[in-house]
Image: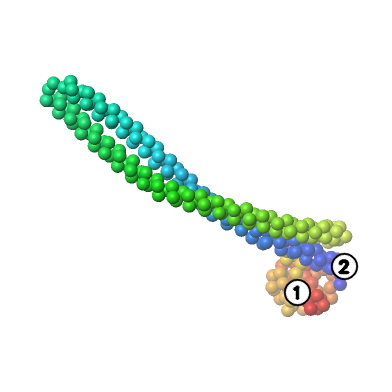
Amino acid sequence: MNKHLNELIELSKIDQAIDSYNPQLEAADKKVAKVQKKIDTAQAELDELTSAIADNEEKVKSFEEQLTLLNEQLASNVKKAKEITTEKEMKALSLEEDIAKEKMTFANEEIERLQAINETKTALLDEANEKVDALSADLNKIMEEVSAEKAEIEKSKGELFVKREELSRNIEQKVLSFYEKIRAWAGNTAVVPVKKQACYGCYMKLNDKTYSEVIKGDEIVNCPHCGRILYIEKVTEEA
Ligand SMILES: [Zn+2]
C-alpha cells in the first residue's frame, strides 16, 4: 500500500484515539457539576432560611422595643392619673391606656407568632446545614475521583500526542497539510474505510473505478462525493 496512505491511516487513528477521551472528560466534568448544582440549591435554601430568621428576629426586637416604650407610657400614665382633675382628662387618659394595651397585646402576639415561625425555620436550617455538609463531602470525594480519572486520561493523551508528534515528523509536509485540510472540516473522519463499496464518511456508494483504485491502494484516493481519504481495511486487521 501507498506509504503516505499508511501514514495517514495511522495518524488518523491516533487523532481518533486522542479525541475519544473527550466524552470521558466531559462526563467527569458533568459529574462534578451535578453535585455542585445540588450544593448551590441547598446553599440557596440555607441562605434564604438564614435571612428569614434574621428578619424575624429583627421584627421581634422592634416589637420588644415597642413594648418597652408602651410600658413606660403606661407607667407615666399612672403618674398622670394622680394629677387629673377633670373627667374629660380622665377619659382621654383611659383611652390612651386602652390603645397602649391593645398595642401591647398585638406586639406580644406577634412576638409569639414570629418566634414559633423561627423555631420551625431553625429546625429546617439545621437540616439544610446537614445537607450542605453532606453534599460538600460528596463533592470532595467526587472531585478526588475525577481528578485522578482526568490525570490518567491526560497521561494517556500525552503519550498519544508524543506518538502523533513522532509520526507526523516523518510524514511529508505536503501530505500532512492535505490531511489537516480535510480534518479541518471532517474532524476525526478525515480518513475513512470503504465498506460494501461505500465511503464510511458520507455513506455514498463509490463507482467501480474509484473502488478499484482504493483496493489497489497505489495512490491516495479521495471520496468523489465528500472528499475524505479512503482506504480498504486489511482483512488481517479486521480479524
Ligand atoms: Zn464520502
Residue placed under numbered mark 2 in the picture: 3
Relative to 6, say whether 170 is above or below.
Answer: above
The mark found on residue 214 in the picture is none
Relative to 127, say whether 229 is above or below.
Answer: below
Q: Is residue 177 visible?
A: no
- Amino acid type indicated by mark 1: Val
Secondary structure beneath dot 1 equals strand
Q: Is residue 153 visible?
A: yes
State whether label 1 is within 8 Å of ligand 1: no
Residue placed under numbered mark 1 in the picture: 194
Q: Position of residue 88 (x, y in %)?
A: 13, 25
Q: Residue at x 40, y 39 (%)?
A: 57
Colour convention of the picture: rainbow
Q: Residue at x 61, y 58 (%)?
A: 31
User: In the rendered view of the protein, which quadrant contains the N terminus?
Assistant: bottom right
Q: Residue at x 17, y 30 (%)?
A: 94
Relative to 58, say whether 17 is above or below.
Answer: below
Crowd class of label 1 (few under 14; some 14 to 19; many from 20; radius 10 Å): many
- Amino acid type indicated by mark 2: Lys
Q: Quadrant of residue 146?
A: bottom right
Secondary structure beneath dot 2 equals helix
In this picture, residue 107 sits left or right of residue 198: left
Q: Position of residue 222 (x, y in %)?
A: 77, 68
Q: Please state which of residues 62 and 201 is positioned toward the viewer in this rendering.
A: 62
User: In the rendered view of the protein, which quadrant contains the C terminus?
Assistant: bottom right
Q: Position of residue 66 (x, y in %)?
A: 32, 33
Q: Residue at x 73, y 59 (%)?
A: 153
Q: Position of residue 211 (x, y in %)?
A: 78, 76
Relative to 195, say whether 74 is above or below.
Answer: above
Crowd class of label 2 (few under 14; some 14 to 19; many from 20; radius 10 Å): few
Q: Earlier in the sequence, mark 1 or mark 2?
A: 2
